[in-house]
């Protein structure tokens, strides 16, 4: 899919399009913080997180622990989503408070380097779906465009042929991949507070593995870890991937203003309160990319304003159901892998 296929001729004064939308959003009070909402959300997520660990200790040596591993994966994902909101400054205006809370939620609670992930995610927001600048579409394992397919080699070239079928199996490894990437990031001198990050990540791993192997015998412990990390990875994939995968992939040749760059590469997911809660508000991806610091609770209210404004500009605003979003993403993955399947071996 190309940008030309998703945008209509735009009116003049492009540079001011986002400014006018931003004024409307600000006048509606949608950039104001929501301390009550986050106080309730943090309390519920903390209760879920602590409750699953308490239930784990109470169950002891039981096969029911495998079911609890699934619930614990949900708790870990919800904590990760809170860390995401902290990184964007949605919860507190204080960068110091956000960073401290982010280190606790990310590094200590779920074993994810807050500093590494924040840097990676900031680069994604600056250039979503851009081949050269967005780390989320780097061809490390999967390929996201035909250009990447033609230039691929090694593992990405091997996997790329059937990557649509391998996508969900690969997501089961994402939880472990995030932990490995977090520890690898500690070697970067550019990472702030490396000592603190290292200490908190190590504390998480020791406490996490220590608790599991203390309560469960070796076979059950290994199976519990496998189920928990697999479900955690799939949950995160189901949260983040529907937002951009299958949308236009940009290159240096694409010259777009801020509003079009964010809207044309993003997709909203319909589904009501259940989907909104499960995806942490990221189902309103277009609004989130336009206004990253907007509290999650306000994204739903911003949607009609943004949607109508895009319609007035002739800018395509894409939204669909959750299953359809996955269908579009998987079809895109299969299509960009076509050149690799057509190569004679």
Image (tube, rainbow, N blue to C red):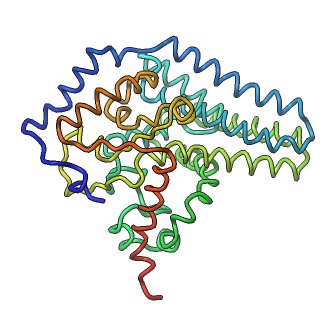
x, y (%) of residue 68? 79, 38
- Residue 248 relative to residue 35: left or right: left
- At 40% from the left and 40% from the top, the residue drawn is 268
State which quadrant residue 314 falls in.
Answer: top left
x, y (%) of residue 252? 22, 56
Q: In the rendered image, is residue 194 in sight? A: no
In the image shown, does 227 or 219 lie closer to the viewer?
Answer: 227
Q: Is residue 333 above or below residue 229?
A: below
Residue 151 shows in the view: yes
Q: What is the x, y in percent for residue 112?
A: 59, 39
Q: Is residue 300 left or right of residue 59?
A: left
Q: Is residue 228 above or below residue 139?
A: above
Seen at 49% across and 73% down, the residue is 161
Residue at 81% in and 39% down: 210
Q: How many marks?
A: 0
Compared with 333, 175 (above or below) is above
Q: Could you say which is closer to the camera, residue 233 or residue 334?
A: 334
The spot of residue 222 in percent (x, y) is 81, 51
Residue extending farthest bottom: 345
Image quarter in which the N terminus is found: bottom left
- Side of 43 where 332 appears, left or right: left
Between 215 and 317, the one nearer to me in the picture: 317
Q: Residue furthest left?
A: 12
From what the image shows, is residue 180 above or below residue 269? below
The residue shown at (36%, 40%) is 125
């Amino acid at each position: 899919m190309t940008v030309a296929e998703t945008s209509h001729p735009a009116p003049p004064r492009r540079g001011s399009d986002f400014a006018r939308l931003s004024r409307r959003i600000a006048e509606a009070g949608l950039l104001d913080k929501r301390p009550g909402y986050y106080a309730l959300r943090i309390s519920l997520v903390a209760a879920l997180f602590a409750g699953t660990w308490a239930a784990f200790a109470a169950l002891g040596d039981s096969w029911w622990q495998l079911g609890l591993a699934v619930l614990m994966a949900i708790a870990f994902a919800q904590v990760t989503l809170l860390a995401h909101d902290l990184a964007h400054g949605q919860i507190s205006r204080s960068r110091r408070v956000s960073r401290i809370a982010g280190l606790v939620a990310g590094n200590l609670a779920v074993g994810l380097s807050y500093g590494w992930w924040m840097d990676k995610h900031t680069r994604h927001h600056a250039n979503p779906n851009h081949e050269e600048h967005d780390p989320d579409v780097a061809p490390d394992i999967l390929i996201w465009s035909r250009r990447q397919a033609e230039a691929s080699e090694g593992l990405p070239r091997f996997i790329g042929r059937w990557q649509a079928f391998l996508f969900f199996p690969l997501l089961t490894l994402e939880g472990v991949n995030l932990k490995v990437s977090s520890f690898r990031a500690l070697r970067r001198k550019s990472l702030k507070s490396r000592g603190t990050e290292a200490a908190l990540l190590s504390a998480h791993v020791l406490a996490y593995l220590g608790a599991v192997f203390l309560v469960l015998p070796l076979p059950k412990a290994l199976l519990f870890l496998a189920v928990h990390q697999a479900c955690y990875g799939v949950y995160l994939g189901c949260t983040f991937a529907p937002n951009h995968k299958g949308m236009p992939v940009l290159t240096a040749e694409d010259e777009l203003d801020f509003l079009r760059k964010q809207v044309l590469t993003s997709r909203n997911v319909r589904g009501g309160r259940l989907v909104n809660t499960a995806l942490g508000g990221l189902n309103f991806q277009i609004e989130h990319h336009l206004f990253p610091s907007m509290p999650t609770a306000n994204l739903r209210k911003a949607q009609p304003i943004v949607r109508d404004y895009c319609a007035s500009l002739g800018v395509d605003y894409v939204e669909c159901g959750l299953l359809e979003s996955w269908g579009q993403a998987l079809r895109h993955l299969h299509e960009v892998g076509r050149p690799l399947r057509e190569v004679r071996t």
